Image (cartoon, rainbow, N blue to C red):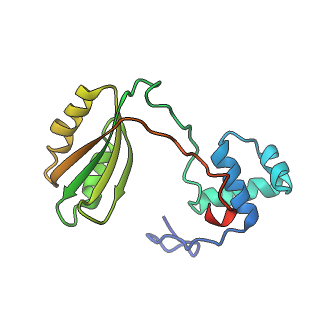
Amino acid sequence: MADRSGAPGTVPPARPLDSTDRAILRILQTDGRASIRAVAERVHVSRANAYARINRLVEDGVIRGFGARVDHERAGQGASAYITLKIVQNSWRTVREQLQALPGATHIALVSGDFDVLLLVHTPDNQALRELVLTKIQAMPEVLSTRTLLVFEETDLGPRPDLPPELV
């Protein structure tokens, strides 16, 4: 990606968000399918202004995409787990690419503390989870160790309309 000056390989600095931008983000987090017209009406700007702001938020990488919040159990993914990984130093990018290719991987984070990576996966059942951990993740040469934490129940918090705008 190039910055606004056109220099290759640099990420442009983030432009500051105003209260209208934050209001648009809250609306789209609640309903990613909201029309430009509905967004414009709710934030009291013209459709052209709402369209331009949403495009800028996408262009700036503030909005990374639009998607659906899925009930994984109802979608046939009845087993969920957080998997912690200790990895070889300086192998994050390689490990991240391999983890992104795994079926059922929904969240990957490089973290600090007792382990290096936190991975959230959803699989059809415990057998598929076991196979994923033992034959795919632990087979990666950069992975030194794993720990699997089964999820018994989860709640998708989604957007937080109860929080003040400055905390969203």
Taking the spot 72% from the left edge, 68% from the top edge, the residue there is: 18
Comparing 127 with 96, the one in front is: 127
> In x, y percent, where is residue 83?
27, 46
Would residue 161 appear left or right of 6 to someone viewing this image? right
> In x, y percent, where is residue 47?
83, 51
The relative height of residue 6 versus residue 40 in the rendered view (above or below) is below
Number of numbered discs present? 0
Picture quadrant of residue 81: top left
Would residue 144 appear left or right of 85 to someone viewing this image? left
The relative height of residue 154 versus residue 64 in the rendered view (above or below) is above
Would residue 79 appear left or right of 27 to someone viewing this image? left
User: Which quadrant of the figure contains the C terminus?
Assistant: bottom right
Taking the spot 59% from the left edge, 72% from the top edge, the residue there is: 4
> In x, y percent, where is residue 106?
40, 43
Picture quadrant of residue 62: bottom right
Comparing 120 with 15, the one in front is: 120
Taking the spot 13% from the left edge, 51% from the top edge, the residue there is: 141
Comparing 70 with 140, the one in front is: 70
The relative height of residue 86 versus residue 123 in the rendered view (above or below) is below
Taking the spot 56% from the left edge, 60% from the top edge, the residue there is: 61
> In x, y percent, where is residue 12?
54, 71
